[in-house]
Image: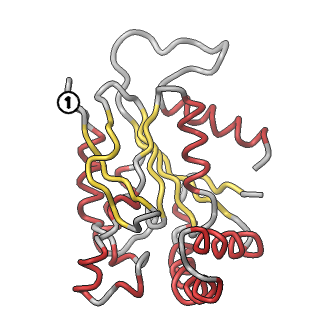
Amino acid sequence: MEARLFEALVEAGRGLAGVPAPGGPGTGPGPVRRRLLGIAGAPGSGKSTLAERLVDRLDGLAVLVPMDGFHLAGAELERLGRAGRKGAPDTFDAAGYAALLTRLRTPEPGVTVYAPAFDRSLEEPIAGSVPVPPGIPLVVTEGNYLLHDEGPWARILPLLDEAWYLDLDARVRVPRLVARHIRFGKDHAHAERWVHDSDEANTRLIARGRGRAHRVIPMG
């Protein structure tokens, strides 16, 4: 991503957090209501990287809450017969994710909310990993299905103040995705099969939500 585009996204994030651009008018006294920014896109499109960079640049104004923390545990996927489709919409607790976002929209004074995260080295969600203090004005959340409109996923987009869709050419995205699977333990043949049979099937589903995004971001 070119530097100028990233800086524009940082300013958009600052605006969502209720912070005026340098040289602009102040926001005035009183609390700033919390806002939620969602970053969606296909596997390997750069969601996590952009979200982490954005939160880092916002320097205490935002917390990152990943959708991947709502992966069902491996044992439950095995029980349901869905382990071979891990990453598909029905391998997440979408209703739980919607409930957390609903809670995050209306912070209680003095109450820190704890969100789950996903440990790629374990391939498991980890509860209570991400503290969201009540004074944080912006929550950034990223994941595949923020723009999906079926079942409980349809509850997600209305909870977001803004949703971005990351658009990356498959010629860049697919090799990056294969390399990521290898880095986390799959051999090359298994990684390629997983990307072809699972990730790319999910990508086609995710792409259907592109038109529902408030902003489509080209990723170079």
Badge 1 is on which residue? 111
> Looking at the image, which residue is at 35% across and 66% down?
124
> Looking at the image, which residue is at 28% across and 71% down?
73
> Looking at the image, which residue is at 57% across and 20% down?
20
Classify 83 as above or below 179. Answer: below
What residue type is disc 1 on?
Answer: Val
Dot 1 falls on a residue whose secondary structure is loop
On the rendered structure, is 36 left or right of 77?
Answer: right
On the rendered structure, is 34 left or right of 206?
Answer: left
The quarter in which the C terminus is drawn is: bottom right
Residue 36 quadrant: top left
Total label count? 1
Q: Position of residue 156 (x, y in %)?
A: 36, 58
Classify 30 as above or below 143. Answer: above
Question: Which of 2/83 is in front?
Answer: 83
> Looking at the image, which residue is at 46% across and 33% down?
62
Q: Position of residue 202 (x, y in %)?
A: 51, 79
Q: Position of residue 127 (x, y in %)?
A: 27, 53
Question: Which of 56/96 is in front?
Answer: 56
